[in-house]
Image (cartoon, rainbow, N blue to C red):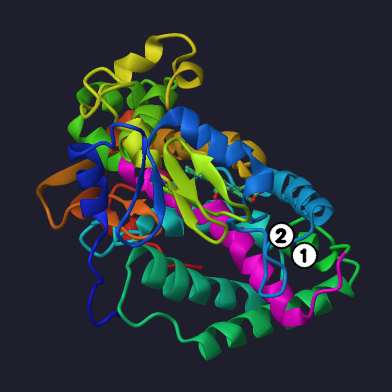
Amino acid sequence: MPLMRRPSLWHHVVSWDRRPSPTGVIRLTTGAVLVTDPKLANYVLVRAHLYEEQSAFLRTRSWRPLPFEVRNEVIRGLMSALDLRHAPSSTMLVLDRRGVLTPGWGIWWMRRLFHDTIACDRPAVFDTAIDAFVDQVILGDDVGGSFRRTPAPALAELYRVLGDAIVIAGSQSHDPGDLVSVVANLDLALPPVEQGELFTRLVHSVISFTGIALEWAVLMACRDDSFRAALRAGEDVRHFLWELQRLYPTAWRLVRQACADHQIGDVQVAAGDDVIVATAALHRSEAHWKRSKEYLPTRWTEADLARDRAFIPFGKGRGMCPGRSAALEAIQDSLHSFYDRYEIIGGRRAHRSPYVRSILAPPRVRLRARARAARVPGCSPPACLSTTSELVGDRS
Ligand code: HEM
């Protein structure tokens, strides 16, 4: 357990809301350049030659990022590994003994949903090491934000264990096309420790943003009758998900490092400067969205809204998220699966405001799942799980 939480960076989002830069770009006291205008953001994200080549996930300690061809190879492998995802199942819900969803439940849910995408029918060492990674790094460092980050030697040991297991897996005939196969078959000589590192970054890419976006969706469904009604009716709920990504973008800012002197708007940028694209500011800007701070999913009935507006939840340009459709599909399927079987009841009291570090996570609210046994005619326990104790899951 972390000793203490690091302070949330939510106040950045709030201060961008309060004082939008009139020119859409400003140099912060920290020296970084902050971009809050959609045209300028577009310029930064697509003008690749002005910025260092980088990738959120496709890198290792000696490749930042992997060579372009190898990145494409990894993305192709990743996309086909996504087909191995499980169908959402009620038994994957992560509840405590009182039926309350436990902290980080969305990420554990995605961990299970994408279990076979990550490592399909592999030795137990994979599950053990991946669970440790989710617990210590994704939840402990990136979402929970403990003061004590996972120490570098412990992280290197985790990478080494996974890397050694990937090397062994690569020498065997079993090749299910999961992420283990993707890294093991890569056309690039990487030492085992870097194979392990790349593998964990891919795991991160698949489950963390997706799990947090799912948590936001369930929280909002507790407060929004129309969202719940649509879920119970099995309707398409992507407009609710888009509105949540607009107001609370999981990837709330994107950072680039300049590799050449240039100008953005009226600000002179020098090589080496950090340039921050303030996704949350674009999405919440009064100049681009009517009633911009309000949650209004119906705004998405307007055709081509995403294309016309300042909306970049999945980034833009060469590094844009390749998993965006898969993510929305996984979230939507998961929500339908919950609301088919359960009522999720949200407590009134938020234990904290949104917790923002590298990911914009929802406020912690007590959420309780109650089985809706009556929904499935003729179904009796255990098939429709009428008691919460039957829903208490483990993390494997
Ligand atoms: C709601 C869920 C998700 C959100 C909000 C999200 C958001 C993003 C964003 C903003 C970027 C660009 C980062 C940058 O430009 O610096 C990105 C990159 C990436 N995402 Fe996602 N993502 C999600 C789900 C997924 C899923 C399910 C996958 C699995 C295929 C995935 C794989 C990746 C990869 C591999 C990259 C790096 C691409 C590159 O560098 O070429 N993401 N994601």
Res. 339 in view: no
Q: Is residue 187 above or below residue 43?
A: below
Mark 2 = which residue? Answer: 179
**Res 183 label:** 1
Looking at the image, which residue sits at the far left?
Answer: 349
User: Residue at horizontal 34%, vertical 32%?
Assistant: 23
Q: Amino acid at mark 1?
A: Val
Q: Amino acid at mark 2?
A: Leu
Q: Which quadrant, please, contains the N terminus?
A: bottom left
Query: In the rendered image, which quarter is residue 140 located in?
Result: bottom left
Q: Is residue 282 above or below residue 101?
A: above
Taking the magenta stretch, the answer to whether it contains residue 384 is no
User: Residue at horizontal 81%, vertical 77%?
Assistant: 167
Q: Position of residue 96 (x, y in %)?
A: 27, 64
Question: In terms of secondary structure, where does tag 2 sit?
Answer: helix
Q: Position of residue 19 (x, y in %)?
A: 20, 39
Dots 2, 1 in contact, CB < 8 A: yes
